[in-house]
Image (tube, rainbow, N blue to C red):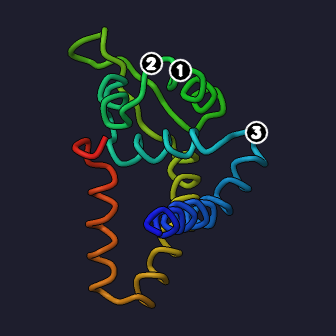
Amino acid sequence: MRDRELNRALEALHFAFRAVIKKPDERLAKLGLSRVHHRVLYFIGHRPKGSVAELLKAMQVSKQYLHRPLRQLIRQGFVRMERDPDDGRIKRLSLSEKGKQFERQLSGIQRGRFARVFAESGPEAEQTWYRVMALLADKRFD
């Protein structure tokens, strides 16, 4: 009986995630980009002038995972990489104006969906959602 309820939770997560990423994924695909590119844009946009090492830590990914999408975003003019003026070994990342606009567009679609859902469900449900998401990400449950 419990498995049935837990399967319901898995399916709810699956379909909710698909709904949240559907429109941004469609826009990314038109440019030959994928969801990972959106994640990179998001994290760089919310940590301007962060280093590559800081981005890796924030995203909790490996250099290998990040290398190709980051190079594509730089090549397509969405991301700028500059050497740190105080330590030339450090590379600082920021979004170009084009990158800022694209990230705002992609994440804006998702923020709008969350805003509508939270308005519908109410503040108590929103707070419960944050708690469940935090617990799902908690390493204690690995």
Residue depth check, mark 3 versus mark 2: number of the one nearer the observer: 2
Q: How far apart are marks 3 and 2 (CA)?
A: 21 Å
Using a 10 Å C-alpha cutoff, classify the residue at mark 3 as few (fewer than 14 neighbours), some (14 to 19) or many (20 or more): few
Q: How far apart are marks 1 and 2 (CA)?
A: 6 Å
- Tell me if residue 125 can be seen: yes
Q: In this view, does 54 lie to the left or right of 21?
A: left
Query: Is 87 above or below relative to 72?
Result: above
- Give the residue at mark 1: 67
Query: Is 103 above or below relative to 60?
Result: below
Mark 3 and mark 2 lie on one chain; the one further toward the N terminus is 3
Mark 1 and mark 3 lie on one chain; the one further toward the N terminus is 3
Using a 10 Å C-alpha cutoff, classify the residue at mark 1 as few (fewer than 14 neighbours), some (14 to 19) or many (20 or more): few
> Three-letter amino acid code at disc 2?
Lys
SS for dot 2: helix
The residue positioned 43% from the left and 22% from the top of the image is 62
How far across and how far down the image is residue 86, in percent?
Answer: 21, 16
How far across and how far down the image is residue 34, in percent?
Answer: 66, 42
SS for dot 3: loop
- Give the residue at mark 2: 63
The residue positioned 26% from the left and 41% from the top of the image is 139
Which quarter of the figure has residue 75?
A: top right
How far across and how far down the image is residue 17, in percent?
Answer: 56, 61
Q: Which is nearer the eye, 132 or 115?
A: 132
> Three-letter amino acid code at disc 3?
Gly
How far across and how far down the image is residue 71, in percent?
Answer: 58, 23
- Give the residue at mark 3: 32
Q: Which is nearer the eye, 13 or 110?
A: 13
> Three-letter amino acid code at disc 1?
His
